[in-house]
Image (spheres, grey):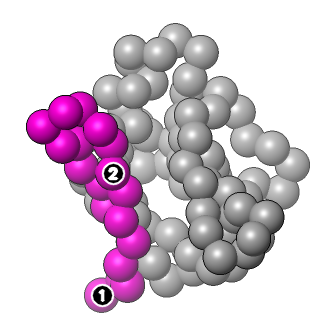
Amino acid sequence: MLALTENVTEIVNKLSEEVPEMSGVRIAAEPDGQSLSVSPADHALDGDQTIEQGGATVWVEANAAQALDGMVLDGGVDEDGNIQFALGQQA
């Protein structure tokens, strides 16, 4: 299962507070099968895996969940306010 860092939980929680129609983020595999997308969401879709940590909710689409098993999602915000996510292997 995908693990979340404290940075990611803080980012998702802050976004959820600022955007009332958003209650989490959703990670999905792109049609090319080579990349993933992260987008605001207000609920899971059928087959999504739900990860709740530190008050943050992340839904992972079934195809993405397989690719992300054993990974950790980290994130940060740059000086311009852009959110960036990165994946690494779980220790």
- In this picture, residue 77 sits left or right of residue 51: left
Instruction: Report the residue marked by disc 2.
Output: 84
State yes or no: residue 82 in magenta. yes
Tell me which amino acid carries mark 2: Gln
Residue 47 in sight from this viewpoint: yes
Magenta-drawn segment: 74-91
Position above or below: 29 against 9: below
Q: Residue at x 55, y 27 (%)?
A: 23
22 sits left or right of 31 in the view: left
In the rendered image, residue 55, in percent from the top left (x then y), is placed at 40, 37
- Verify whether residue 70 appears in magenta: no
Q: Quadrant of residue 72?
A: bottom left
> Which residue is labeled 1 in the image?
91
Asked if residue 27 is positioned above or below residue 1 in the image, the reply reads: above
Residue 11, picture quadrant: top left
Q: Earlier in the sequence, mark 1 or mark 2?
A: 2
How many numbered marks appear? 2
